[in-house]
């Protein structure tokens, strides 16, 4: 009986060590998210593991009207709280298990109001690109939806004026 308890306890310790060790901490990474209404507007946000961010805003429609390019670009450093919130969300998203594209299954007529989303995630020498067009959010994991919420809040708090 003692042998069974010892074996069971050993097995539990090994399993917990395996599950704990299987989740590597996210170290060096680069993440970008953009949404674009083709020929009209583009907003991009980039985050890096060194806590830097970059927000790029392009208003193609108004630039074409004014006959000049006037992108609004803002760079900065994430606060410790922002980085502490972002990092585990990125880790839980499992980008490399996601499909490369969503919403392109059926060919439809391109509407100039269509919005295209693009995600790029790089870590440990691997890169994942994801393109999304008019896709139902029900296809995405709760972590990915939470990431989009984080980005929206972040952009609202760091808006270019």
Image (cartoon, grey):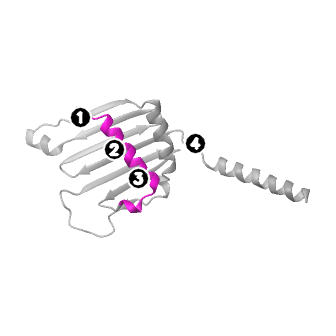
Which residue is denoted by mark 3 in the rendering?
145
Instruction: Please say if 82 is above or below 21.
Output: above
Instruction: Decide if residue 123 is on the left or right side of residue 74.
Output: right
Which residue is denoted by mark 4 in the rendering?
25
Q: Where is residue 51 shown, x and y percent of the image?
A: 45, 32
Nearest to the observer: residue 134 or residue 105: 134
Q: Alpha-carbon distance for marks 1 and 4?
A: 34 Å
Q: Alpha-carbon distance for marks 4 and 2?
A: 25 Å
Q: Nearer the viewer, mark 4 or mark 3?
A: 3
Q: Where is residue 27 shown, x and y percent of the image?
A: 54, 39
Give the numbered dot on residue 72: 1
Q: Secondary structure at mark 3?
A: helix
Q: Nearer the viewer, mark 2 or mark 1?
A: 2
Q: Secondary structure at mark 4?
A: loop
Q: Where is residue 59 shown, x and y percent of the image?
A: 18, 42
Between disc 1 and disc 4, whose residue precedes?
Answer: 4
Q: Secondary structure at mark 1?
A: strand
Between disc 4 and disc 2, whose residue precedes?
Answer: 4
Q: Alpha-carbon distance for marks 3 and 1?
A: 26 Å
| Mark 4 in CB contact with mark 2 (< 8 angstroms) | no
Which residue is denoted by mark 2 in the rendering?
152
Instruction: Decide if residue 104 is on the left or right side of residue 127.
Output: left
Image quadrant occupied by the N terminus? bottom right
Between disc 2 and disc 1, whose residue precedes?
Answer: 1
Q: Nearer the viewer, mark 4 or mark 2?
A: 2
Instruction: Decide if residue 18 is on the left or right side of residue 63.
Output: right
Please say whether residue 146 is one of the residues in the magenta stretch: yes
Instruction: Please say if 52 is above or below 150.
Output: above
Nearest to the observer: residue 101 or residue 13: 13
Please report the residue visible at 27 percent of the width from the left and 69 percent of the height from the top: 107
């Amino acid at each position: 009986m003692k042998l069974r308890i010892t074996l069971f306890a050993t097995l539990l310790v090994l399993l917990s060590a395996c599950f704990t060790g299987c989740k590597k901490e996210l170290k060096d990474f680069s993440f970008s998210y953009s949404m674009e209404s083709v020929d009209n507007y583009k907003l991009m946000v980039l985050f890096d593991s060194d806590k830097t961010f970059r927000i790029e805003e392009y208003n193609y429609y108004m630039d074409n009207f004014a006959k000049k390019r006037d992108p609004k670009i803002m760079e900065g450093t994430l606060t410790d709280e922002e980085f502490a919130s972002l990092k585990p969300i990125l880790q839980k998203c499992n980008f490399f298990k996601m499909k490369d594209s969503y919403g392109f299954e059926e060919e439809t007529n391109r509407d100039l109001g269509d919005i295209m989303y693009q995600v790029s995630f790089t870590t440990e020498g691997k890169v994942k690109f994801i393109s999304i067009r008019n896709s139902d959010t029900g296809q995405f994991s709760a972590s990915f939806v939470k990431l989009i919420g984080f980005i929206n809040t972040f952009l609202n708090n760091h808006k270019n004026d």
